Image (cartoon, helix red, strand yellow):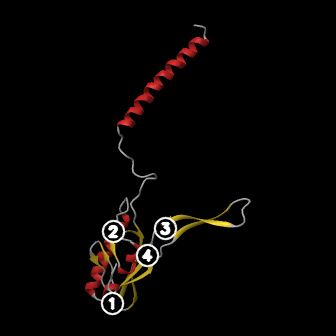
Amino acid sequence: MLVDSPIDNPAAWDSITIDGIDTPGTCALSGGVRRTKIDQQVSPMQSGSFSVTRGLELVSVDYKVRVWTTEQFNELQTLAARLAAAQESRPPRQLRLVDIAVAHLKMNGAEVAWLGPIENPKPGTWTLGFGFLQWKKRKPIGGVARPKDDLDRENEAKEQRNAGVRAQLEAHNVARARGL
């Protein structure tokens, strides 16, 4: 995976792309750490603890976009409206995120975790802070259900026949108990 060098092309590292639209001004990144879930456990009669790896946590990244022109400010307002709409949708809307700095984390899709106000930290500049959480498609435990084949249908038919025989046997035992 080759990406633009920040020394040769610093502009590529100053912005991100959200759903095909580049952020205006400059964009500062914080977060973006991929952690492994680890449980430390101790068993009775053992000498010490051991660790159990539970998998990878979702990546969370925070951004702060800074603008300084009227055109950039208008684009910032549009970006804020898009992020707010994506955050309010149910189920949460997946956004395509392209950021060279977190490309190695394979965070292609994201959902809006938080969205701050448009602020004016000093005259002539405005900022918007927001955060993304890595989006992953949910997978059922044990994988996707497979379609039923002939053996499954045959087993279901046998179970139905067996249930009928069990019901007849129970009725026969009840009649025998009554002396009939």
Q: CA distance from mark 3 to mark 2?
A: 19 Å
Q: What residue is pinned by disc 3?
A: 57
Vertically, is 73 above or below 109? below
Q: Earlier in the sequence, mark 1 or mark 2?
A: 1
Q: CA distance from mark 4 to mark 2?
A: 14 Å
Q: CA distance from mark 1 to mark 2?
A: 24 Å
Q: Secondary structure at mark 4?
A: strand
Q: Secondary structure at mark 2?
A: strand
| Residue at 51% over, 72% down | 35
Q: Earlier in the sequence, mark 4 or mark 2?
A: 4
Name the residue type under label 3. Answer: Glu
Residue 27 on image: x %, y %: 36, 83
Residue 152, quarter of the rendered image? top left
Q: What residue is pinned by disc 1?
A: 10
- Say if mark 1 contacts mark 4, CB within 8 Å: no
The answer to whether residue 113 is visible is no
Residue 98, quarter of the rendered image? bottom left
Q: Secondary structure at mark 3?
A: loop
Q: Nearer the viewer, mark 4 or mark 3?
A: 3
Vertically, is 112 above or below 128? above
Residue 90 on image: x %, y %: 37, 59
Vertically, is 171 above or below 121? above
Residue 31 on image: x %, y %: 46, 78
- Say if mark 3 contacts mark 2, CB within 8 Å: no
Q: CA distance from mark 4 to mark 3?
A: 13 Å
Q: Is residue 147 left or right of residue 21?
A: right
Name the residue type under label 2. Answer: Leu
| Residue at 47% over, 73% down | 34
Q: Who is closer to the viewer here, 4 or 23? A: 4
The numbered mark at residue 95 is 2
Q: Is residue 14 left or right of residue 37?
A: left
Other-residue count near label 3 (Cα within 10 Å), few / some / many at <14 / 14–19 / ≥20: few
